[in-house]
Every structure is written in C-alpha cells, then in structure tokens.
Amino acid sequence: MKIAMIVAMDEEDNIGNGNNLPWKLSSDLKRFKLLTEADGFNAVIMGRKTWDSLPEQYRPLPDRLNIVMSRDTNWEHEDAEVALYHGRAIEIAYADGCDECWIIGGAQIYELFLDRVEEIHLTKVHTTGSGEVKFPNWDRTNWEEELIEVIDDNEDDEFTTSYSIWRRKI
Ligand SMILES: NC(=O)c1ccc[n+]([C@@H]2O[C@H](COP(=O)([O-])OP(=O)(O)OC[C@H]3O[C@@H](n4cnc5c(N)ncnc54)[C@H](OP(=O)(O)O)[C@@H]3O)[C@@H](O)[C@H]2O)c1
C-alpha cells in the first residue's frame, strides 16, 4: 500500500489560517480530488481539527475511506473511522484493502507522518504571510523535487502555484 502526503503551502511554509485554508485555488482542489481518489479505493488520513474544518456538505470526502486521528477515546462519527495513534490509522487502511493512503493534514498530522512517507505532493502557493499554521520543519536535503506543473493565477486561482512531487532519496 502506497503512503503519500499531499499539502499546499505558501513560500514561508504556511498551510492554514485559523482552522481554514488561506487561499481559493480551484485547480489545486481538483488535483487533490483526482490524486486522492485515483482509480482504486484509497484512504485519507487527517487530524480531528482538519475534519472539523471541512464544511459538512463535503465530509466525508466521497469515494475515499476517511480516517480521523484523535486522542479523544470518545470521538466518533458515523462517516469516519477514528485512529488513536498513527500505526492504527495505517492498519485500518490496510485492513480495508486500500490501494493508497494519503496523509492530508493538518500540521500535527504532517509532523507525525513526515518521517514515514516516501513521497510528498506539494503545491507551492506563490505568496507569503498566509496564516499562522505552519508545515513542520522539513530537511529537504534528503529529498528530490520533480516539478510537474506551474499554473498562473486566474479567475479561479487566487495565486500562481507550482505543483511538485518530492521523493525521498534512496
Ligand atoms: N494547506 C494544506 O494543505 C492543509 C491541509 C490540511 C489542513 N490544513 C490546515 O491545517 C490546520 C489544522 O492543522 P492542526 O495542526 O491545527 O490540526 P490537525 O493536525 O488537523 O488536527 C490536530 C488533532 O489531531 C489529533 N492528533 C494529533 N496528534 C495525534 C496523535 N499523535 N495521535 C492521535 N491523534 C492526534 C488531535 O485531536 P484531538 O484534539 O481530538 O485529540 C489534535 O487536536 C487548519 O488551518 C487547516 O486548514 C492545511
């Protein structure tokens, strides 16, 4: 089972503003859906705060197994699986026969999995000062970037973005 991370961050590694995404980027949301759904049956792993931040009409994220990480043993939701520790989240995805498992944030959950993924799908948003929630410290020297696509700002994308795949060097 492939385990990969997907994140959008600005030029200062900011990923969130309060409990929201700071930007309006239609092309990035479409890519997120395409990648995380793919052809098979995939899981998305997220923190409880990111789950809370999803508008009710968009959760659970459709056609994917939604796994929410919480330390609260009373947390439950009929549309999501709950995991109290990272290994449990992977175990649930594996036991359900998922082809891919996507770590979709937020900051605490990225930090938890950063050493455990081989691939990071990163959308760099070409702006600064987007919010106070930051991606964890990440030593990029052990990683290689493959730039896939640059999309200029347009009526559906507030800022220019660059989409890259980062792979851990062997
Ligand atoms: N730009 C992006 O790509 C992107 C993607 C996703 C989210 N975001 C942004 O990120 C922000 C949210 O990030 P965040 O760091 O505040 O919250 P988060 O990572 O979404 O969720 C944090 C919660 O996860 C649970 N948790 C954390 N570590 C755990 C562990 N080791 N074991 C079990 N459960 C654990 C805890 O839930 P309990 O409190 O219930 O115990 C904790 O409060 C928002 O601004 C959101 O919009 C950005």
Image (tube, rainbow, N blue to C red):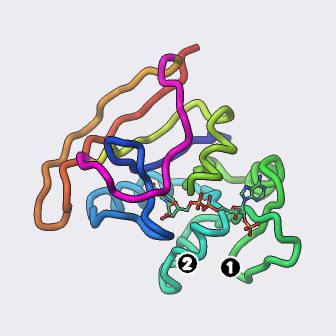
Distance Cα–Cα, label 2 vs label 1: 8 Å
Pick whichever, 97 or 83, lies toward us. Answer: 83
Q: Amino acid at mark 2?
A: Arg
Q: Amino acid at mark 1?
A: Asp
- Provide residue 81's location: percent of width, then percent of height: 75, 69
Instruction: Determine whether, in the image, residue 29 is placed left or right of residue 92.
Output: left
Quadrant of the image containing the C terminus = top right
Q: Up-down: is 152 above or below 145? A: below
Pick whichever, 78 or 96, lies toward us. Answer: 78
Q: Up-down: is 70 above or below 112? A: below
Judge: label 2 CB < 8 Å from ligand 1. no
Residue under the point 19% across and 62% down: 158
Q: Up-down: is 140 above or below 41? A: above
Instruction: Determine whether, in the image, residue 161 is placed left or right of residue 169.
Output: left
Residue under the point 51% across and 75% down: 54
In the rendered picture of this protein, how many numbered marks are placed on residues? 2
- Provide residue 153's location: percent of width, then percent of height: 14, 55
Tag shown at residue 59? 2
Magenta segment includes 99: no
Question: Which SS class for mark 2?
Answer: loop
Q: Are marks 2 and 1 in contact (CB under 8 Å)?
A: yes
Residue under the point 68% across and 79% down: 79
- Provide residue 128's location: percent of width, then percent of height: 28, 49
Q: Local crowd at mark 1 within 10 Å, few (<14), some, or many (≥20)? A: few
Judging by the rendered image, the residue that carries numbered circle 1 is 79
Instruction: Determine whether, in the image, residue 9 is placed left or right of residue 63.
Output: left
- Provide residue 39's location: percent of width, then percent of height: 49, 54
Bounds of the magenta segment: 126-141
Instruction: Determine whether, in the image, residue 137 is placed left or right of residue 90.
Output: left
